[in-house]
Amino acid sequence: MSGAISCITEDLKITSVQKEILIGSLNVFSLIGSLAAGKTSDWIGRRYTIILASCTFLIGALLMGFAPSFEFLMVGRLVAGIGVGYSLMIAPVYTAEISPNST
């Protein structure tokens, strides 16, 4: 995000406060995804939760890529943040489950 922020600032005419909110919001939104990942993985399984996380992140990236305004960009950031939270929580668990026992 830091590499694209100068282009976003020029194209969308956002203020410095909006820029700070935009950059810092992903961490807050990923908290939502990480909290929901445990229940989701118990409900549909680890593998399908990883698929859900990647699809959520893809949708968020598409929304951010085609964002015509700051509000639309924040919605994309929300969706992508939830996907990141899911991924950060469930990928290590899945990796630990499929790894062989060490002898």
Image: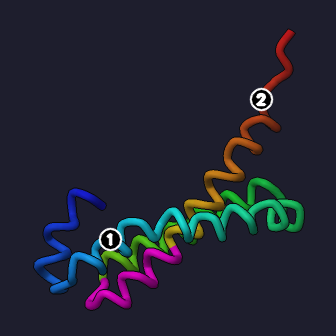
Q: Main secondary structure of the magenta part?
A: helix
Picture quarter containing residue 12? bottom left
- Marks 1 and 2, how far apart at CA: 40 Å
Q: Is residue 39 left or right of residue 24?
A: right
* Residue type pointed to by label 2: Ser
For residue 33, above or below residue 13: above
Write down the residue under mark 1.
20
Write down the residue under mark 2.
99
Q: Residue 47: which numbered mark, if any?
A: none
Q: Earlier in the sequence, mark 1 or mark 2?
A: 1
Q: Which residues are magenta?
A: 67-79
Crowding around mark 1 (Cα neighbors within 10 Å: few <14, some 14 to 19, many 20+) is few
Judge whether residue 35 is colored magenta.
no
Q: Secondary structure at mark 2?
A: loop
Q: Between residues 20 and 60, which one lies in front from this camera angle?
A: 20
Q: Is residue 76 left or right of residue 37?
A: left
Picture quarter containing residue 72? bottom left
Q: Quadrant of the N terminus?
A: bottom left
Marker count (numbered): 2
Crowding around mark 2 (Cα neighbors within 10 Å: few <14, some 14 to 19, many 20+) is few
